[in-house]
Image (spheres, rainbow, N blue to C red):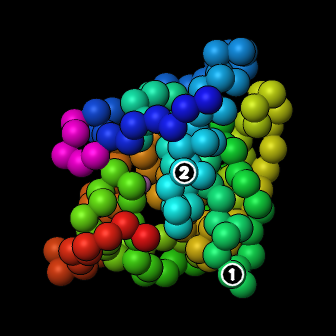
Amino acid sequence: MAVLDVLVYPDVRLKKVSIAVTSFDEALRRFLADFDETLHAMPGCVGLAAPQVNYFHRIALVDVSGKPGIPHNGRLLLINPEITEREGEAVGREGCLSVPDYTGNVVRATRIRVRAQDADGIYREYACEGYEARAVQHELDHLDGLLFLDRLVSRRDLFRRKVYR
Ligand code: NI
């Protein structure tokens, strides 16, 4: 297993639209092992999308279980994900491994249902709310070549930071 390099803005590859996963084979399993290790090597990081590690397939991993006191589904591996329901709206601060120097305010749905395949290609559906719902929407944007920078509430809703956390 290996920790993969993360593409950093303004790398144009972050704008690519990723393609669907069609083979749930050994090559996918090997990628998923490295992908998982990469997310967990980043302290405080709650999600990662495959295109961020230069693999342009529709795969995202979200794990907000390390944050205290919020509802979550544990480690959420989402392959070919689709949001099937969204409800509510809230502004919240987001960061991204691919945008290490900034955070920004973005509007997201507060409750979603997301349908996705797991590592074996089985379809599953998850209900997410609050912080986890935000993290899922952020990661799914990466699959369409979008960053939180593309969704800022306003130009004043961008904040410089010194360290990633
Ligand atoms: Ni991100």
Give the SS element for disc 2: loop
Residue drawn at point x = 39 percent, y = 59 percent: 96
Residue closest to the eye, 18 or 163: 163
Q: Amino acid at mark 2?
A: Ala
Q: Earlier in the sequence, mark 2 or mark 1?
A: 2
101 vs 54: above or below:
below
Residue drawn at point x = 22 percent, y = 39 percent: 11
53 vs 25: above or below:
below
Quarter-of-image position of residue 116: top right
Residue bounds of the magenta highlight: 8-12
Position of 100 with respect to 119 (left or right) is left
Q: Main secondary structure of the magenta part?
A: loop
Position of 116 with respect to 41 (left or right) is right
Q: Is residue 11 magenta?
A: yes
Q: Which residue is mark 2?
A: 41
- Categorize mark 2 by other alpha carbons within 10 Å: few (<14), some (14-19), many (20+): few
Return the x and y of residue 123 as percentages of the image width and height. Answer: 80, 37
Structural distance between the alpha carbons of marks 2 and 1: 19 Å
Q: From the image, which quarter does the N terminus lie in?
A: top right
Return the x and y of residue 104 as percentages of the image width and height. Answer: 31, 73
Residue closest to the eye, 124 or 139: 139
- Categorize mark 1 by other alpha carbons within 10 Å: few (<14), some (14-19), many (20+): few
Quadrant containing ligand 1 reads: bottom left
Q: Mark 2 or mark 1: which is in front? A: 2
Q: From the image, which quarter does the C terminus lie in?
A: bottom left
87 vs 143: above or below:
below
Q: Are marks 2 and 1 in contact (CB under 8 Å)?
A: no
Residue 156 at least partly seen: yes
Residue drawn at point x = 73 percent, y = 54 percent: 75
Q: Which mark is residue 68?
A: 1
